[in-house]
Image (cartoon, helix red, strand yellow):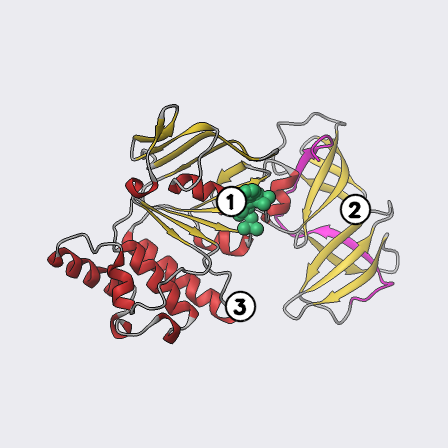
C-alpha cells in the first residue's frame, strides 16, 4: 500500500454559528485523482482552501508528504505549502501573455530553469502555438490549459481544482475534461477535483469522496460508490434512486413489486423491515393488462424516457427506458429486475 501524500484528520471549521466542516477525514495518494462529490454548500471549497492554507480550521491535522503543515501549534503558511490551486474562473492575468502567465509563479528561479519548465509544461498542455496570445484571445478550454500549465510550472506537491469545468458550455465540457485528465495523468500530479456533477466525478477520478454537511460520508472507487453505497444519502448522490419498503427474506427482499435479490445479505436478519434502493435503470417494464403497476407519467428526454410508475401499494417508482413509443400513462405494467441486478437495502432509520 502506498503512503498517502496528503492526510487530513478531524478537521472542523465554523463561520459564526455555522459549522461548515465537521470532523472531516480524507487522504490522497501519489499520482491519484480524487473527486470530491457533494451538493452546493456542503463545504467543498472550504476544504480546498484549508488544504491550501487560505483558511484556518479550529481543530484537526493536515500532513503533506509526511510533514505536518497544520495542527496544534503548526500552521505552515500558504506560500510554503507548494500546493497548486485552479479556480472556476481560471484567474489568469488578463494583461499578461500566455507565456508570461505561465512564468509568473516561477519568476524567482534562474532563467535556465524557467525556460526548461516552460518547455515542459507547454508540451504537456500543447500550448506551443499560443504562447504570445493574451487570455481574452483564447477559448474557455485553452484558458483552462493555461491555468493548468501555470500551476504545473511550479511543480506543485498536489493540485486542487475547484469546479474547473463549470464555466464551459456542455458541448465543450467532455472534450476539455478528457484533455485535462490526460494532462494530469501524464504529469502524474496528485489532484483533488471538486464537483457537484456525478458523471464528471466518476469519469475522471480514481477514487470519489462523497461529501455532505461538512464531512466525507464514503470514499472509494467510482464503481464501489455506485454499487455499494453505505447510506441512502450516498446512494442518492451517486445516481438516481428510488426507495421502497421491503422485508428481508434470506438473500432476497420482499417489496410491493416482487421479490428482489440482495447485493449484500449478511447485515440484516429475516423479517427485518428495510428500505430498498432501486436505480432508475434497475427494472424493466412489460405492458400487461393484468399488471399490478400503473404508468402515471412519462417524461421524454431524448436519449432516454423517465416513467413514473405507481405500484399496488401506491409507492411511486421512476424507471428509465430507451423505448418510449409503446409505453404511456394509464398502461398496466409488470416490473421485474433487469438481469443480474442486485439490490442494496438500508435500515429504516437511515434518513
Ligand atoms: P458550492 O458547490 O456552491 O461552491 P461548496 O460545497 O464549495 O459549495 P463552500 O463554498 O465551502 O461550499 O461553503 C460552505 C458553507 O460555508 C456555505 O454555507 C458558505 O456560505 C459558508 N462560507 C464559506 N466561506 C465563508 C466565509 N468566509 N464566511 C462565512 N461563511 C462562509
Which callout, 2 or 1, points to the residue nearer the camera? 1
Q: Specify which label sits upstream in the sequence, 1 or 3.
A: 1
Residue 289 shown left or right of residue 166 in the figure: right
Q: Is residue 204 visible?
A: yes
In-front residue for pair 252/26: 26
- Disc 1 is placed on an element classified as helix
Residue shown at the point (60%, 38%) measured from the top left: 213
Q: Is mark 1 within 8 Å of ligand 1?
A: yes
> Would you say 99 lies left or right of 202 here?
left
User: How far is disc 3 from disc 2 in space, using C-alphas?
Assistant: 37 Å
Dot 2, crowdedness within 10 Å: few (<14), some or many (≥20)? many
x then y, percent, for residue 323: 70, 67
Quarter assignment of residue 298: bottom right
Distance of label 2 from label 1 (alpha carbons): 38 Å
Instruction: Name the spot of residue 197 as percent of width and height, x first.
Output: 55, 54
In the displayed structure, 292 sits above or below 252; it is: below
Q: Quadrant of the N terminus?
A: top left
Q: Which residues are magenta?
A: 327-351
- Report if the beta carbon of the residue with label 2 is closer than 8 angstroms to ligand 1: no
Q: Residue at x 24, y 65 (%)?
A: 123
- Magenta span: predominant SS is loop
The residue that label 1 is drawn on is 44
Q: Residue at x 44, y 44 (%)?
A: 48
Query: Residue 257 has which mark?
Result: 2
Amino acid at each position: 500500500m502506498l503512503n498517502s501524500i496528503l492526510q487530513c484528520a478531524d478537521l472542523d471549521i465554523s463561520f459564526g454559528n455555522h459549522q461548515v466542516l465537521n470532523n472531516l477525514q480524507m487522504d490522497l495518494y501519489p499520482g491519484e485523482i480524487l473527486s470530491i462529490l457533494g451538493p452546493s454548500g456542503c463545504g467543498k471549497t472550504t476544504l480546498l482552501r484549508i488544504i491550501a492554507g487560505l483558511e484556518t480550521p479550529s481543530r484537526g491535522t493536515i500532513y503533506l508528504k509526511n510533514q505536518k503543515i497544520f495542527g496544534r501549534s503548526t500552521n505552515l503558511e500558504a506560500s510554503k505549502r507548494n500546493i497548486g490551486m485552479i479556480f472556476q474562473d481560471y484567474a489568469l492575468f488578463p494583461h499578461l501573455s500566455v507565456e508570461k502567465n505561465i512564468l509568473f509563479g516561477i519568476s524567482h528561479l534562474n532563467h535556465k530553469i524557467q525556460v526548461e519548465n516552460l518547455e515542459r509544461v507547454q508540451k504537456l498542455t500543447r500550448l506551443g502555438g499560443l504562447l504570445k496570445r493574451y487570455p481574452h484571445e483564447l477559448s474557455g478550454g485553452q484558458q483552462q490549459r493555461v491555468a493548468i500549465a501555470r500551476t504545473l510550472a511550479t511543480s506543485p506537491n498536489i493540485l486542487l481544482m475547484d469546479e474547473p469545468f463549470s464555466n464551459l458550455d456542455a458541448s465543450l465540457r467532455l472534450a476539455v475534461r478528457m484533455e485535462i485528465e490526460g494532462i494530469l495523468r501524464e504529469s502524474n500530479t496528485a489532484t483533488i477535483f471538486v464537483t457537484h456533477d456525478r458523471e464528471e466525478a466518476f469519469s475522471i477520478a480514481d477514487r470519489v469522496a462523497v461529501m455532505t454537511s461538512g464531512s466525507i460520508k464514503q470514499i472509494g472507487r467510482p464503481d464501489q460508490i455506485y454499487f455499494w453505497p453505505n447510506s441512502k444519502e450516498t446512494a442518492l448522490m451517486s445516481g438516481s434512486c428510488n426507495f421502497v419498503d421491503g422485508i428481508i427474506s434470506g438473500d432476497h427482499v420482499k417489496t410491493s413489486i416482487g421479490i428482489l435479490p440482495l447485493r449484500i445479505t449478511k447485515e440484516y436478519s429475516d423479517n427485518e423491515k428495510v428500505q430498498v434502493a432501486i436505480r432508475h435503470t434497475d427494472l424493466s417494464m412489460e405492458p400487461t393488462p393484468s399488471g399490478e403497476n400503473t404508468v402515471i407519467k412519462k417524461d421524454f428526454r431524448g436519449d432516454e424516457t423517465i416513467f413514473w410508475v405507481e405500484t399496488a401499494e401506491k409507492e411511486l417508482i421512476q424507471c428509465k427506458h430507451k423505448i418510449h413509443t409503446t409505453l404511456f400513462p394509464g398502461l398496466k405494467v409488470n416490473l421485474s429486475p433487469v438481469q443480474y441486478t442486485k439490490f442494496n437495502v438500508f435500515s429504516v432509520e437511515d434518513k
